[in-house]
């Protein structure tokens, strides 16, 4: 295994080994999808490595990573839901509104 080039990278590696299983498991429970959970966890770790180099390692890096991964999953799910809702025709909804307003 390659040596860490910075203290932040070493800390991120240690946090990954300790926390990645829990983070992915909590994301699977939240999203119901293994692929999405792993993708969001990896994204959180990648962003954390950059942030840790720039801002320093937070007091509770596992909590920070879990929150970042969950926020990413919420963003992905909201985007997917939004795309689906835009794909549906608006005409039936508009007709229902007009029918209710006419009463």
Image: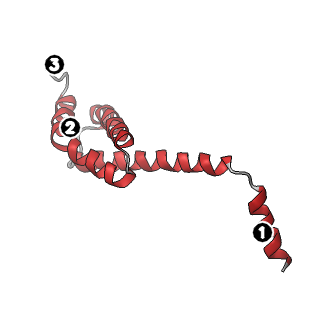
Name the colour scheme: secondary structure
Q: Residue 54's x, y, as percent?
A: 31, 33
Q: CA distance from mark 3 to mark 1?
A: 62 Å
Quarter of the image with the N terminus is top left
For the C terminus, give its image quadrant: bottom right
Quarter holding residue 95: bottom right
Q: Which mark is residue 12?
A: none
Residue closest to the eye, 70 or 94: 94
Distance between mark 2 and mark 1 Cα atoms: 51 Å
Name the secondary structure under disc 3: loop
Question: Quadrant of the rendered structure where residue 43 is?
Answer: top left
Q: Residue at x 76, y 60 (%)?
A: 92
Residue 29 % position (x, y):
32, 54
Tell me what residue is drawn at x 21 percent, y 32 percent. Answer: 8
Give the crowd class for mark 1: few <14, some 14-19, many >=20 residues within 10 Å. Answer: few
Q: Residue at x 32, y 40 (%)?
A: 41
Residue on which the image places disc 2: 16
Which residue in the protein does label 3 denote?
Answer: 2
| For the residues bearing labels 2 and 1, Cβ distance under 8 angstroms | no
Categorize mark 3 by other alpha carbons within 10 Å: few (<14), some (14-19), many (20+).
few
Residue at screen point 20% across, 37% down: 16
User: Which mark is on residue 97?
Assistant: 1
> Which one is in front, 9 or 20?
20
Q: Is residue 59 left or right of residue 64?
A: left
Residue lying at the far right of the rendered structure: 102
Task: From this view, report whether residue 99 is shown above or below residue 64.
Answer: below
Q: Is residue 98 above or below residue 51?
A: below
Q: CA distance from mark 2 to mark 3?
A: 15 Å
Residue 47 percent location from the top left of the image: 35, 35
Q: Earlier in the sequence, mark 2 or mark 3?
A: 3
């Amino acid at each position: 295994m390659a040596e860490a080039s910075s203290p932040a990278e070493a800390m991120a590696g240690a946090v990954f080994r300790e926390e990645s299983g829990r983070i992915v498991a909590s994301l699977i429970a939240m999203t119901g999808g293994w692929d999405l959970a792993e993708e969001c966890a990896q994204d959180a770790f990648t962003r954390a490595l950059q942030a840790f180099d720039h801002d320093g390692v937070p007091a509770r890096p596992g909590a920070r990573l879990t929150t970042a991964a969950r926020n990413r999953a919420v963003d992905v799910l909201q985007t997917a839901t939004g795309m689906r809702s835009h794909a549906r025709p608006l005409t039936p909804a508009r007709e229902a509104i007009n029918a209710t307003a006419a009463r």
